[in-house]
Image (cartoon, grey):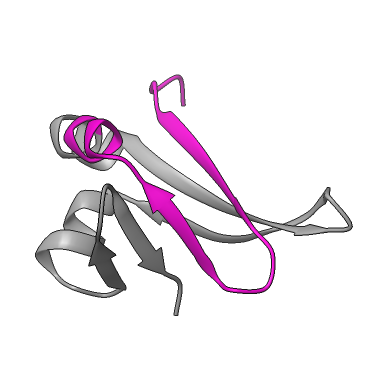
Amino acid sequence: NGEEIYIEVKGFQNNYSFHWSENEISVSKDLSNKYYIYCVRFKDNIPNEIFKKIQNPYKEIIVTGKFEYKIKKDFLVKLQ
């Protein structure tokens, strides 16, 4: 439809989690529904499938708590 969106691609293998930096979180908050995280599963270091698409990840992860996360230097988000 011509609407501009922003996609952050996060890869994972067997632990179903990815690192999410403070800068990425800030951009996600600012762009809200125009920002997506595409979680891509890798097999043998080759992209295998888009496992999950998260629109407005700031809302989905931080605000509504749909995903578990831990804060260290950056966020470690666990896909459910």
> Camera-side residue: 77 or 2?
77
> Camera-side residue: 70 or 35?
70
Q: Which x, y percent locates residue 13?
A: 69, 64
Q: Which x, y percent locates residue 2?
A: 45, 19
Which residue is drawn at the image coordinates 18% and 73% (left, top)?
A: 65
> Camera-side residue: 25 or 70?
70
Q: In the rendered structure, which segment of residues is drawn in magenta?
A: 1-27
* Residue 46 shown left or right of residue 41 in the figure: right
Which residue is drawn at the image coordinates 41% and 28% (left, top)?
A: 6
Q: Does the magenta stretch include residue 61?
A: no
Q: Which residue appears farthest toward the left when viewing the image?
A: 63
* Residue 9 shown left or right of residue 33 in the figure: right
Number of dots carrying numbers: 0
- Looking at the rendered image, the quarter that the C terminus falls into is bottom left
Note whether 14 is above or below 25 in the view shown: below
* Residue 42 shown left or right of residue 17 in the figure: right
Which residue is drawn at the image coordinates 10% and 63% (left, top)?
A: 63
Q: Quadrant of residue 36?
A: top left
Q: Which residue appears farthest toward the front when viewing the image?
A: 73
Q: Which x, y percent locates residue 10?
A: 54, 47
Which residue is drawn at the image coordinates 16% and 61% (left, top)?
A: 62
Q: Does the magenta stretch include residue 21?
A: yes
Q: Which x, y percent locates residue 49?
A: 75, 58
Q: Which residue appears farthest toward the right when viewing the image?
A: 44
